[in-house]
Amino acid sequence: MAKFGRLIGVSLGPGDPDLITIKAYKALKSEAIWSYPIRRKGAESFALKIALNAGFQLPETNIPLIFPMTHDPKKLLSYWHKAAETVLVPLSAGLDVVFLVEGDASTYSTFGHLVRTVLEKEPSIKIETIAGVPSFNAAAASSGKMLVEVDDTMAIVPAGYGIKLLEKLMVDFDTLILLKVKPLLDDIIELAEKYDMVSQCSFIEKAGTNEEIVVKDIRTLKGKTVNYLSLIIIHNPHRQRAEIMRGCRKK
């Protein structure tokens, strides 16, 4: 029976090299082949940049994998299959492959697409995931505010789901983290004004990088174009709370 290599998702954090975990550091120092996502042929890889900024040298043998910025399911599927077939070559030869991931490999990551497609083609491949620091945790640290405390509730949602859903979540949760806010920024600001939560909002762009921007008064961003890597953390001090069941006494 052939011995396959391992496919390892290496989480590198949101951009600050100091947030790379010791476990991720060890994986990068191993003999495993590096693979990393790019948007198109010849493009820069943000994940790779984090590793290089940490002082690593790109191994001579490395595998850039194209994951295009498109919502076309047929096109995406085609690229996922190409990526899987590419990494299966060294994996089938018994070599480990690390896939570099910005943030955390289990949170809105292309690693999930790669894993599913690889396992469809070869179910015997062993998958490992090294946990990392997600962008919203780095953003909370930069904002100087706690995300949640004690029995608080929290929702993490891509803003693209639309204002109608975001309005409901803003009311229903103590903390709402909105990712990829660029297309709906002005609408989100108006929503925060409507519910008197502007003072409870923090806007963070490129969290955890040397280009990080933190804005406490989000009204100053009206009409402005922000980076794709932007999020907003909203705390709701007005939420009506139900009684919490503790232990098994009231179950």
Image (cartoon, rainbow, N blue to C red):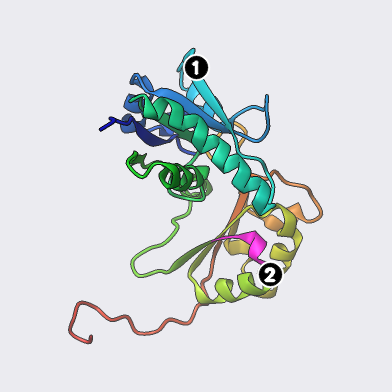
Question: Is the C terminus in the top left, top right, bottom left or bottom right quadrant?
Answer: bottom left
Label whose residue precedes the other's in the sequence (1 or 2): 1
Q: Which residue is mark 1?
A: 58
Above or below, comparing residue 22 to residue 181 in the picture? above
Quarter of the image holding residue 178? bottom right
Q: Nearer the viewer, mark 1 or mark 2?
A: 1
Can the viewer see residue 27 in this picture? yes
Residue 11 percent location from the top left of the image: 42, 37
Quarter of the image holding residue 197? bottom right
Magenta span covers which residues?
Answer: 157-162
* Mark 1: secondary structure: loop
* Mark 2: secondary structure: helix
Q: Which residue is mark 2?
A: 163
Quarter of the image holding residue 153? bottom left
User: What type is the residue that disc 2 sits on?
Assistant: Ile
Residue 46 percent location from the top left of the image: 58, 32
Residue 1 numbered tag: none
Q: CA distance from mark 1 to mark 2?
A: 42 Å
User: What type is the residue that disc 1 sits on?
Assistant: Leu
132 lies left or right of 43: left
Above or below, comparing residue 59 to residue 99 in the picture? above
**Residue drawn at 20 percent across, 77 percent down:** 247
